[in-house]
Amino acid sequence: MLGGAAREKTRAYFTGNNVELGLKLGFTAFKLPVDVSPHEGPDAMKRFAAKLIETRRLIGPDALLMIDVLCRWNVEYTIEFAKRAEEARLFFLEEPLLPDDLAGYERLCREVTSTKIASGEHEFSHYGFETLLRLNAAQLLQPDLTWSGGLTTGLRVAALASSRGVPVAPHRGGSVYGMQLIAHHPACILAESFGTGEPGNEVMAMLTAPFQNGHYLPVPGSGCGVDWTPDVLRSKAPSLL
């Protein structure tokens, strides 16, 4: 109904600190959450940069490596860290600043040359993404379809990004909902892990797209491929019935 698929499968990236598990599962791209902040001083920065360089050695030269800062840093800290971590060859550096610091993101996109600056997880309409692109304040967009208006907004964001040559990697893209957009639109280049390798339950399993050899696949069948049977709803969400 969206017009067909751009690809049959999409490279997945593993989010988490257990890189060895990700390698065992077959991932070839990895994103580590950041656990250091500016107030901890330069030694903490050095330790985390060294951790990333060691991770690069572990995953090999052809794997992708990214970090998610979780909005903990400031502009100056991010610029210095990007220089220290050049040997790790980061593909993108996600949300180093608070989402509303557009001037800061514009400066990072202008001054950091060793990696892409990723943002957008906390935007809630395509208007916010248009602003990021217009100000050159993001080099990779990360809409979350369950937060930012669903599939329609996702399509608008992907179209905006494509018109400016900016890639898209939706937040929680490995969910069955994210994969519909990712499989359809050429601007979407990666699918974030969702459920794979995580403790889960029947509902989580239903919401996780099929995973195979380091790639996520769209769920076959109509809609998003989730069959919310009465038995599942009664066992997992009785208050809704």
Image (tube, rainbow, N blue to C red):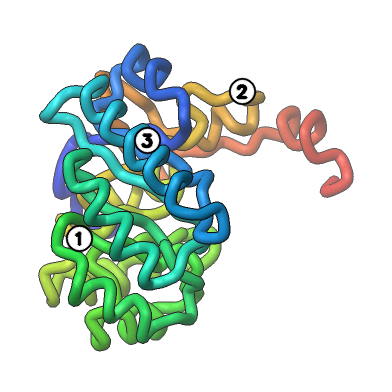
Q: Earlier in the sequence, mark 3 or mark 1?
A: 1
| Figure check: 109 above or below 194 | below
Separation (CA) of disc 1 from disc 2? 30 Å
Q: Which mark is residue 167?
A: 1
Secondary structure under the numbered disc 2 in the rendered image: loop
Residue plotted at (48% across, 73% down): 99
Q: Residues within 10 Å of mark 3 (few under 14, many from 20)?
A: many
Residue plotted at (39% across, 24% down): 19
The amino acid marked with disc number 1 is Pro
The residue nearer to you, when weighing 234 against 190, is: 190
Secondary structure under the numbered disc 1 in the rendered image: loop
The residue nearer to you, when weighing 229 against 164, is: 164
Residue 117 in picture, x, y percent from top left: 28, 63
Q: Residues within 10 Å of mark 2 (few under 14, many from 20)?
A: few
Is residue 47 shown left or right of residue 167?
right
Residue plotted at (29% across, 25% down): 27
What residue sits right under mark 3 in the picture? Answer: 219
Dividing the picture into quadrants, the one containing residue 26 is: top left
What residue sits right under mark 2 in the picture? Answer: 199
Is residue 99 shown left or right of residue 110?
right
Secondary structure under the numbered disc 3 in the rendered image: loop
The amino acid marked with disc number 2 is Pro
Q: Residue furthest right?
A: 239
Residue 213 in picture, x, y percent from top left: 25, 19
Residue 236 in picture, x, y percent from top left: 77, 33
Q: Which mark is residue 69?
A: none
